[in-house]
Amino acid sequence: MNDRAALDLLLEHGPLSRTRIGNLTGLSKPTASQLLARLEAAGLVRVTGTSEGRPGPSAQLYAVNPGAAYAAGLDVAPDRIRAAVADITGRTVGEYELPTPGRRPAQSVVRQVTDALDGAVKAAGLARGELHRVVIGTPGAFDPNTGRLRYASHLPGWHSPTLLDELAAALPMPVEYENDVNLVAVAEQRLGAARGHGDFVLLWNEEGLGAALVLGGRLHRGWTGGAGEVGFLPVPGTPLVRQVTRANSGGYQELAGAQELPKLARELGVPDVPMGPYTESARELLARAADHADGPHRELLTAYATRLATGLAALVSVLDPELVVLSGSALTAGGEVLRALIQAELEELAAARPRLVLGDIREHPVLRGALESALATTRDEVFDTSR
């Protein structure tokens, strides 16, 4: 326990002296010295320099050895696979992005996963066998009862019943699979806006609407892995959608998905509505509206806030979370202006009144969550000096 406490402190604070580690852990100097000697012999810490600027002799500074282990994360989307490798301190040491256009069979998926992973491994100057663990994030979720991907019909090639076995055979390290929005919540809980919160909802809006539910400090995935697939939620204000998995859409998606913003903007008379891909158009419209925040732009933000709050009201009424994190570019582009409007609408529509905040992790949040998830398990295993 003392070893792990010291390692966690070094991860949190960076290089520390023996005396500082003793003070933070409450250990005596001899015990702290023995602990550091043991961790250094195990290859888990190393001396990185000496303290300066203080009276008296300089003290050696210890830090976690970055090369003690490596983990990887993959973010899978219909048009690309993004991969990254991090050392055990969490520093990203290699990244690679592989375009994946068109439909592809399961065998092609395995090849593309290994190619993306190998690209990141090569960029890190490592070999595939040096990875301790990999976490792969995808839309939808793999049903733990059947092993098949559900809720993501738009992800071609990933629905073979043998896919997980084929990936396990192709990759020499443990592999875990997680829903992409759940991984964004992991990143926000460990590094971002949800740090210190054990009960929160993360609402994601980019290519699709989704949510992650963290209850009692743990992700709630549901019986089939589909907890948080709120795009399928029936809501007032839109026709009832049937056969939702076949349509890969539902009431909340049809009401408040990013694809609705350009249409809503035209109805409200917003000038110069962009005509590009809907996610990029939504991002541009919200950013522009937040800058102007008057006339048709204000109407757009207000109407969109009402649509978003409609689905959120159902979520918070059932879950009563402490916090709601708004993430994904079709939410964060509206900034504090949109957040405040959603907060006000939610307080009108729901009895529970959680605080709404914008997500902090804006750059590749799915990939960052995959790395954080892989690193958490890796650290538990590598830092267990009792074995």
Image: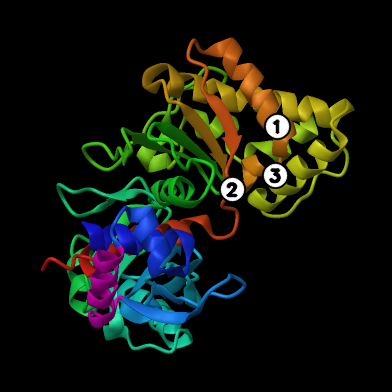
Residue 88 position in % (x across, y down)? 37, 71
Residue at the image point whose x is 40% and y is 77% from the top: 66
Q: Which residues are magenta?
A: 29-44
Residue 345 position by quadrant: top right
Q: Nearer the viewer, residue 120 or 40?
A: 40
Position of the C terminus, as image quadrant, is: bottom left
Q: Nearer the viewer, residue 220 or 78?
A: 220
Disc 3 or disc 2, which is closer to the eye? Answer: 2
Label 1 – label 2 distance at C-alpha: 16 Å
Q: Residue furthest left?
A: 387
Q: Nearer the viewer, residue 1 or 90?
A: 1
Mark 1: amino acid:
Leu
Q: Secondary structure at mark 3?
A: loop
Mark 2: amino acid:
Asp
SS majority, magenta: helix
Residue 355 position in % (x across, y down)? 55, 25
Position of the N terminus, as image quadrant, is: bottom left
Where residue 12 is drawn, which disc sits there?
none
Mark 3: amino acid:
Ala
Where residue 333 is drawn, which disc sits there?
3
Residue that mark 1 sits on: 338
Residue that mark 2 sits on: 360
Residue at the image point whose x is 48% and y is 40% from the top: 194
* 334 relative to 300, above or below: below
Q: Secondary structure at mark 1?
A: helix
* 180 relative to 270, above or below: below
Q: Earlier in the sequence, mark 3 or mark 2?
A: 3
